[in-house]
Each structure stands twice: as structure tokens, then as C-alpha cells.
Image (cartoon, rainbow, N blue to C red):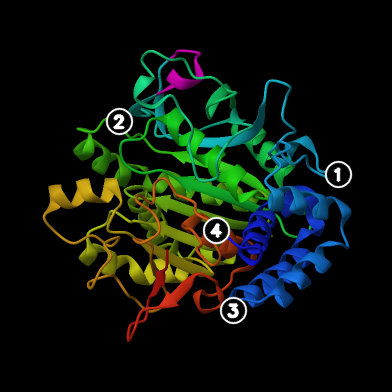
């Protein structure tokens, strides 16, 4: 990799850390840097990269971090600048990990056990009520963006280590009003309050849903309240049928969460990101709100469907409600997503998240074929090299600036088709 490419790579990584480096002042710097990166990608010469270096000299802390990324000298996590603890990511403790605070809303049945990784079961709450709370999750100092570090196949032998793994350190149940207070504390941008809600897919236990949400918060450097909506997935490979029914059952409860968030701050912008079967929960919740004329589009900003495990014909029935529910709707298709592969085997029919010649293209929905970038959208894998951008990077651009696909680097329009391809 030559110097030109290294500068682009370092600048791309720097953009993800700007919220932590500059706090609420980051958007203007981010927009300026994005323009310079785009110029450097389009013109492979020294002049655009020199402009990047000169631009960053205006902010000493930003320049220092850029130089570290450029030379590969790691100094640990970036500490927030004048940001309260409630902003989400804290400075790393001496043990070599940092802590992310994640809020949760779930309609799972409790187990009565106090351990965070055993607090909720894969069964439905008999009361049908949402349970609220907050968790602290470790992000190891050597965390690789897009990776959910864990003991893996050795989890029966090796215990999770916060210095090495993303793990739930603590869990505290909250009442609905205390949850609202916790959300309000995390709306750190006073003129632009935002909340990020992640809805997991099939075969995901509660603690893994929280871990994934924490990883996304840290990787996106999201400047607001981050919430895990965890529906009662059995967390078992053979539990597909039970999960399918529970996803449908949980949809009204996600709609209830959205309503609750809207009462906390009338200006709030909510981003909904769902993976795999979690898209059934999300799309049915959106349909309910639209049919009740609740006008969710006033508060829903980005609606993201990652490898949606929805029957294609059913998706067509829901498409109108999805389009009307938010400011922008994006669908990431993948031929390599593991959960979607299982679904296709079971249903013998096309899914809305399939890619290839029959990829779903609908008016008002931005479809991106990410098959060439990620082996699984669940991993939200990450690879920086010149203009090779990942789903995670593209997602950050969506949430920060609502940039249309024709303006986002790394996306090319499919020849003669109205969808976009993420190039490796």
C-alpha cells in the first residue's frame, strides 16, 4: 500500500472517531473530511492527500490521532472530549478494555437468575409487557472494528475475559420512567437528539443481542442513546420455527418502544437497524404504526434492513408502509448471509434479502448488494483499502448525513438497474 492509499485509509478510520475526539462539534469537520477523501479516491495523486493533511492541522488532537492511524502506532481507545459519562463510551480502565453502556427493551420472560448472561430466557413474557434496563459491556483494547470478540468454540472451556472479549459485565433493570431518564441522559447533542435501536435476528440469545448492540455503538461511534430491542429468540439453531412465531408476536412491542422514545423528546431522530428475522419484527411494527396513522416518519430517520428474512411477496405487501415510515429506507442484500441461507433452505422460496439477478428493487427503497464485501451481514465485516468500504462504514454515512447512495463512496450503480453494488 503506497502513501496515497495509507492516507485515505487513515482518514476513513479517523472519521469514525471524530464524534469522540470533537464531541458535538464533529459534523462540520466530518463533512469537510468526507469531501477531501472523495477527491483523493477519484484522483490518485499526491495533491488531494496533501489537502487532507493540511485540513487536519487545524485540530491538534485530531491531527495527533490521524498520525497514529497513519503510522500504525496504537495508543488505545479515544477518550471523549468534554462529553458526559452518559454519552455511551467511557475511557478504558487500566485492565485494557473500555465500557459501553447499552439500554435494552425486551419482551422476553425473565429467568429469576441474577447473572447478566442468564437474566432472560428465550420464552415470551407472559404479561406481554416490555422490560427495560441498562447493561455495561466491555470492548477490549485490541478490538477490531466489525468483530464481536468471544471465546468462540472454546466457550465451554475458556471464560470470557473483558480484556479480550466483548462481554456483558452488568445488568440493571429499570422502570419505564427510569428508562426514559436514561435515554434522555444519553441524548448528548442538544440540538439533534438521536437514538439507535438494533433488532437482532434468528438464533440470538439476549446477552448476545446486547453484545452485538454494544459493538455496533462502539464501531459507529454513535452520538446518542443506543438501545437493544431483544425479542424472544430461542437462541438455538433448531429453533427457527419458534423464532418465526415470536418475531410476529413481538412486533407490537417494538412499536410500543418507538412510541415511548417519541414521548421522551419530540425532536428525537430514531434509527432502526434490523438483521435477518429481526426485519419481520421491524416491518410489522412499522405497518402497525402507519395503519394507525401515527405518522412515525416524523421521528424515524434511517430504517435499515440487513439481509431481511422476509418472503419476497410478503415484503411487497409491506413495502408501502415501510417507505412511508421513515426518512430513508435502505436494504442490504447478501448471497452469503448465514441466517438467510438457513431460511432459504426451510422455505424453498426467495427472500427479500437475496442478492443476484433477482435482487429486490422497489421505489423509495435504496437496495445495496453487499455480497462482495461481507461473508455475512451479521458480522458487519470491515475492510479498509482505498475506496473499499464495508456495510458498517456505509451505515455510518447513512446515520450521520443521510447521504443518498449515488453520493456515497464505494457504491456503484448496477448496469441498467436501479440498485447499488458495494465493491470489494
Decide which of 135, 127 is in the foreground and name it. 135
Q: Quick check: marks 1 and 2 in contact, CB under 8 Å?
A: no
Could you tell me how far apart the alpha carbons at marks 3 and 1 are, in whole angstroms? 36 Å
Disc 3 + disc 4, Cβ < 8 Å: no
Crowd tier of the residue under label 3, counting other residues whose Cα lies within 10 Å: few below 14, some 14–19, many 20 or above: few
Task: Determine which quarter of the picture holds residue 355.
Answer: bottom left
Using residue 93 as the reference point, say whether residue 160 is left or right of it. left
The alpha-carbon separation of the residues under discs 1 and 4 comes to: 25 Å
From the image, tell me which residue sits under label 1: 82
Image mark for residue 234: 2
Q: Which of the two labelled residues, at mark 1 and mark 4, occupies the earlier sequence position?
A: 1
The magenta segment is: 112-120
55 drawn magenta:
no
**Residue located beneath label 3 in the image:** 42
Which quadrant, please, contains the C terminus? bottom left
Badge 2 vs badge 4, beta-carbon distance below 8 Å: no
Residue at label 4?
A: 393
Q: Quadrant of residue 358?
A: bottom left
Task: Residue 115: say if magenta.
Answer: yes
Amino acid at each position: 500500500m503506497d502513501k496515497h492509499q495509507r492516507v485515505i485509509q487513515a482518514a476513513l478510520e479517523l472519521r469514525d472517531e471524530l464524534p469522540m475526539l470533537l464531541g458535538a462539534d464533529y459534523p462540520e469537520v466530518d463533512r469537510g473530511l468526507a469531501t477531501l477523501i472523495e477527491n483523493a479516491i477519484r484522483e490518485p495523486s499526491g495533491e488531494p492527500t496533501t489537502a487532507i493533511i493540511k485540513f487536519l492541522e487545524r485540530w491538534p488532537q485530531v491531527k495527533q490521532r490521524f498520525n497514529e492511524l497513519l503510522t500504525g502506532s496504537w495508543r488505545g481507545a479515544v477518550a471523549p472530549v468534554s462529553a458526559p459519562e452518559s454519552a455511551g463510551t467511557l475511557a478504558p480502565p487500566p485492565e485494557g478494555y473500555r465500557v459501553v453502556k447499552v439500554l435494552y427493551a425486551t419482551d422476553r420472560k425473565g429467568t429469576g437468575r441474577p447473572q447478566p448472561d442468564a437474566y432472560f430466557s428465550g420464552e415470551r413474557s407472559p404479561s406481554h409487557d416490555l422490560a427495560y434496563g441498562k447493561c455495561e459491556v466491555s470492548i477490549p483494547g485490541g478490538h477490531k472494528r466489525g468483530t464481536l470478540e468471544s471465546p468462540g468454540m472454546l466457550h465451554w472451556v475458556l471464560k470470557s475475559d473483558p480484556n479480550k472479549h466483548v462481554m456483558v459485565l452488568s445488568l440493571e433493570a429499570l422502570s419505564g420512567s427510569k428508562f426514559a431518564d436514561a435515554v434522555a441522559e444519553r441524548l448528548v447533542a442538544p440540538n439533534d437528539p438521536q437514538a439507535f435501536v438494533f433488532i437482532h435476528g434468528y438464533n440470538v440469545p439476549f446477552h448476545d443481542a446486547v453484545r452485538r448492540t454494544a459493538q455496533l455503538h462502539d464501531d459507529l461511534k454513535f452520538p446518542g442513546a443506543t438501545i437493544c430491542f431483544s425479542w424472544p429468540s430461542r437462541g438455538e439453531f433448531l429453533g427457527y420455527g419458534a423464532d418465526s412465531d415470536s418475531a410476529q408476536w413481538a412486533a407490537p412491542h417494538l412499536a410500543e418502544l418507538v412510541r415511548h422514545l417519541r414521548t421522551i423528546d419530540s425532536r428525537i431522530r430514531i434509527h432502526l437497524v434490523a438483521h435477518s428475522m429481526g426485519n419481520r419484527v421491524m416491518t410489522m411494527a412499522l405497518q402497525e404504526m402507519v395503519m394507525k396513522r401515527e405518522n412515525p416518519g416524523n421521528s424515524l430517520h434511517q430504517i435499515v434492513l440487513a439481509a431481511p428474512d422476509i418472503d419476497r411477496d410478503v415484503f411487497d405487501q409491506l413495502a408501502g408502509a415501510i417507505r412511508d415510515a421513515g426518512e430513508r429506507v435502505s436494504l442490504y442484500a447478501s448471497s452469503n448471509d448465514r441466517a438467510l441461507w438457513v431460511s432459504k433452505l426451510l422455505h424453498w422460496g426467495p427472500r427479500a434479502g437475496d442478492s443476484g439477478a433477482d435482487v429486490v428493487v422497489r421505489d423509495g427503497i435504496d437496495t445495496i448488494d453487499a455480497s462482495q464485501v461481507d461473508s455475512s451481514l451479521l458480522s458487519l465485516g470491515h475492510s479498509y483499502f482505498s475506496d473499499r468500504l464495508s456495510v458498517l462504514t456505509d451505515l455510518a454515512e447513512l446515520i450521520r448525513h443521510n447521504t443518498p447512495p449515488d453520493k456515497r463512496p464505494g457504491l456503484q450503480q448496477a448496469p441498467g438497474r436501479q440498485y447499488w453494488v458495494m465493491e470489494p
